[in-house]
Every structure is written in structure tokens, then in C-alpha cells.
């Protein structure tokens, strides 16, 4: 009974699960895929609350755009480059246009579902990196950049770690994307911030979050979705998913606690934005380790991961680096921390795969360090080259006037917030004059 599911829809009936497909695993992975997809709109709220009101809509649109442009690219070509049979550096074209991706088993779930689950990761990673470029990047340039980045940066790195590439063959441990998703996005955001330069008001006036409740809402929804992100990466509904699920609860809780204590010791106050950031840092740090460490180690990992990100986020505003929403500090540094701590804390008794340094296998830490170095180098170089390429076809950055007016109006013709009963209608110079009432009186 478990392995037979009948579907009656659109005139189809009697369509059974393929041999080897498990119904319980499939149900869990359907839920997990939906949870991970939810993380991108959740990120839109998190990022949207952190910027000024005149750019809130544009910032949220950056995440929503990834749902379409990266999602379509993944289905047409990205999935094949990442997971089709190929060499150590890149997958082949065997699954281009979803060729050979059907209802046959891929592990315990349908191949089509595996493709969709992995696609939500590609979408989220692209959305994450936009936080380093908000309030100044032109939207058409962003759409072209994200489309290319998903294919030429994300897909190859996913292949190296998860798709049969050289890092996975070496034994690099990345349970749910510490390297592929968070280090990759953090470095890309850092490069984007450097290429675009600082916002015109950066360092001259306070740039404050316009809606902190949005930030808290986004953090809450991200944590909720992350149970699918990490728990779903077990690709089944068994013990491994349970371990990843519980670790996803414990590690961010420890990070939040450590972050709050650091705030209290430093200023005597705990900020809402700080705790929301702490949740994200803890979630990022546990991601590579979620299925490889014990629950007690997850608590340690979460608490320790607070330190480097916390102090980097204190230092960064003193520089000219305008990583607008601290993507590198929250994702890049926490991803690096989590990947390296996986090499310390991995425990074969819990994961059945490999031990880390603290459990007798120092080579694992060296492998993790190599994977981190490769991810940093490739993401930095690939992102830099793609931004320069896109800049040859369309300007990357909005004009100073557009930045001053806000990107909501100048890039989308809309506003996140409208005061009063209407907005001023702006006509072009070629528009005809308004008709006067009968009698010629205004």
C-alpha cells in the first residue's frame, strides 16, 4: 500500500508510483519543496523591512524575480548542468529541457520531485545574493544577471558538491547547502557590493530599516521554511530527516541566545533586528552540518557561530563596504563557520558517513577547508565576470537622481506605501494637456 498511489486528475486514473518510489518519502518531499519555496517570499519580507520605504517594493521584487527567471532557467538547463551525468567539473546536457526527468525513482522519490526540490535551492540562493545590491541596481540588469548566475555559477558549484563532481568525490560534507547556497550567495553579494559601489547616501546619513516587524516576520517564515530546507535534504522521511529537523531547531536557538547575551554585555539592550539576524546566522551555520552532527553538537555549533558574524557586523559599518543587508556577514561568514565546524563535529555514529576532527578524522577538516576555498574563489570570479558582462549590455546602476527618488517609482512605477487617496500623475512631455471644463474655467 505504501508504494502505490493512484491519481485521478485530468482524465488520468490508475497512475501508480514507479518501482522504488516510497509514498511516505514522497509526501515529505512534496511538503519540503513547498517549504523551501516559501523561503524566497519570506526573504523578501526580511530584506524589504531592512531598507528605506522608498525602496521596499524594489527590494522585495528582487527576490520575487528569482522565482521566475532562475526557476525557468533551472528547468530548461540548470538542473542538467548540475545533476545530469557528466564529468568532475560540470554535468552534461542529458536532462536539458527536462529530458529523462519523469516519475521514475530517484532514490526513494520521483525524479521530477527531486528536480523541483533542487530548483527551490537555486531560486533561494539567487535571491539571497541580491541583499548586497539593493537600493542601487537597475532592475533590467538584475534580471539578466540572475538568469546567467543561476546557470553559470550556481549550477556548476552544485554539481561539484552534490551532482557527482570533484568536491563530493573528495568527501566534502555539505548536507543542505552551506557551501553551495550560503557561501556562494555571501561571496556573490560581497562582489556585487564592491562592483556597484556604495549607495549615494552611505556614510553621509543614517540608513535605517523602515519596517522592523517585516524583518521579524521574514525571519520567522525563514525558520519555518528551513525545516524543509534541511529536513528535506535527507530526501526521505526517516531518521536522518529527524536529525536534521531537530538540529534546525536547536542551533538557531543557541545562536539567538548567544547573540542576545553579546548585545546585553555590549550595550545593555537586545535589538529586534539583531535577534532576527541571529536566527538567520544560526540557520545558515547548521545547514552544512544538519545531518552530520549530534543535537548536542548542534547547540555548540549554533552558539559558536554567533561570534564571528556578530563581530564582523559590528566592524563592517566602519568601512566603505556597503554590503547593504550584510549578506556576507550573515551568510558568507556563517556558511564558512558552519562548513568548518562540520569538519570538527561530524560524528559517524549519528550520520553513518564520516567523523570530524574531534572524533578522530582530522582529514575531514582539511577537505572542508578545501571546499570552502573553492566555493569562495569560484563564486567571486564568476560573479565578477558576469556583472562586467551584463554591464556591457545595460547599465548596472541606477542614476543618482533615481536613487534619490527611490527605486520603487523609478524601476517599477509603483510605491510600497501611498499617503492620502491617490498619487501624483506624472505625464511625459509628449502627453497632451489636460482638457479644461466647459466654459474654460479651471
Image (cartoon, rainbow, N blue to C red):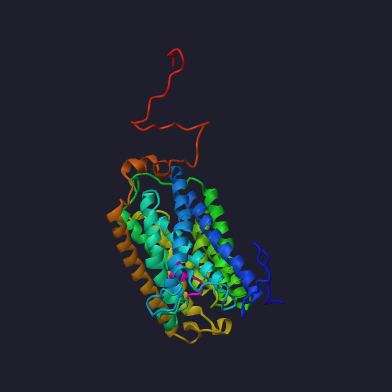
Residue furthest bottom as drawn: 360
- Work out whether residue 152 or residue 401 is closer to the camera in this orientation and state it: 152
The part of the chain drawn in magenta is 174-182
User: Horizontal and vertical percent for residue 405?
Assistant: 38, 39
User: Horizontal and vertical percent for residue 318?
Assistant: 35, 54
* Residue 253 lies in quadrant: bottom right
Residue furthest front as drawn: 11
User: Horizontal and vertical percent for residue 57?
Assistant: 47, 46
Q: Quadrant of the N terminus?
A: bottom right
Q: Residue at x 39, y 75 (%)?
A: 90
Q: Quadrant of the C terminus?
A: top left
The answer to if 63 sits in the magenta stretch is no
Residue 29 lies, with reference to residue 207, above or below; the image says below
Q: Is residue 269 left or right of residue 142?
A: right
Q: Is residue 72 left or right of residue 395?
A: right
The answer to if 175 sits in the magenta stretch is yes
Q: Is residue 261 left or right of residue 16?
A: left
Q: Residue at x 50, y 69 (%)?
A: 118
Residue furthest right as drawn: 1
Amino acid at each position: 500500500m505504501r508504494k502505490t498511489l493512484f491519481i485521478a486528475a485530468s482524465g488520468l486514473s490508475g497512475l501508480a508510483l514507479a518501482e522504488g518510489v516510497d509514498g511516505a518519502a514522497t509526501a515529505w518531499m512534496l511538503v519540503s519543496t513547498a517549504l523551501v519555496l516559501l523561503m524566497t517570499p519570506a526573504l523578501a519580507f526580511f530584506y524589504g523591512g531592512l531598507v528605506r520605504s522608498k525602496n521596499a517594493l524594489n527590494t522585495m521584487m528582487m527576490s520575487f524575480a528569482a522565482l521566475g527567471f532562475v526557476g525557468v532557467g533551472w528547468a530548461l538547463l540548470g538542473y542538467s548542468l548540475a545533476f545530469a551525468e557528466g564529468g568532475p567539473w560540470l554535468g552534461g546536457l542529458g536532462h536539458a529541457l527536462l529530458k529523462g526527468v519523469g516519475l521514475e525513482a530517484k532514490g526513494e522519490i520521483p525524479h521530477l520531485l527531486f528536480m523541483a526540490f533542487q530548483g527551490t535551492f537555486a531560486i533561494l540562493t539567487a535571491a539571497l545574493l541580491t541583499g548586497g545590491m539593493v537600493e542601487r541596481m537597475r532592475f533590467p540588469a538584475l534580471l539578466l544577471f540572475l538568469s546567467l548566475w543561476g546557470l553559470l555559477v550556481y549550477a556548476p558549484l552544485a554539481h561539484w558538491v552534490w551532482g557527482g563532481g570533484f568536491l563530493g568525490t573528495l568527501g566534502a560534507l555539505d548536507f543542505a547547502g552551506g557551501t553551495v547556497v550560503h557561501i556562494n550567495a555571501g561571496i556573490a553579494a560581497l562582489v556585487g557590493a564592491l562592483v556597484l559601489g556604495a549607495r549615494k547616501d552611505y556614510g553621509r546619513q543614517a540608513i535605517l530599516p523602515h519596517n522592523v516587524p517585516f524583518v521579524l516576520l521574514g525571519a520567522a517564515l525563514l525558520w519555518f521554511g528551513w525545516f524543509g530546507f534541511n529536513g528535506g535534504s535527507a530526501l526521505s522521511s526517516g531518521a536522518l530527516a529527524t536529525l536534521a529537523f531537530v538540529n534546525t531547531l536547536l542551533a538557531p536557538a543557541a545562536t539567538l541566545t548567544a547573540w542576545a547575551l553579546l548585545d546585553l554585555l555590549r550595550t545593555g539592550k537586545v535589538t529586534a533586528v539583531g535577534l532576527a539576524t541571529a536566527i538567520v546566522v544560526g540557520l545558515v551555520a547548521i545547514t552544512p552540518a544538519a545531518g552530520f552532527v549530534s543535537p548536542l553538537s548542534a547547540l555548540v555549533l549554533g552558539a559558536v557561530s554567533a561570534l564571528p558574524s556578530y563581530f564582523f557586523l559590528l566592524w563592517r559599518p566602519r568601512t566603505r563596504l556597503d554590503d547593504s543587508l550584510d549578506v556576507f556577514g550573515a551568510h558568507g561568514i556563517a556558511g564558512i563557520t558552519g562548513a568548518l565546524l562540520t569538519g570538527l563535529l561530524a560524528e559517524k555514529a549519528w550520520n553513518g558517513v564520516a567523523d570530524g576532527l574531534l572524533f578522530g578524522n582530522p582529514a575531514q577538516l582539511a577537505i572542508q577547508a578545501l571546499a570552502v576555498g573553492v566555493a569562495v574563489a569560484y563564486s567571486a570570479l564568476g560573479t565578477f565576470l558576469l556583472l562586467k558582462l551584463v554591464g556591457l549590455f545595460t547599465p548596472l546602476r541606477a542614476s543618482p537622481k533615481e536613487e534619490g527618488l527611490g527605486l520603487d517609482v523609478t524601476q517599477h512605477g509603483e510605491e510600497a506605501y501611498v499617503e492620502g487617496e491617490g498619487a501624483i500623475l506624472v505625464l511625459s512631455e509628449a502627453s497632451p494637456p489636460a482638457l479644461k471644463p466647459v466654459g474654460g474655467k479651471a
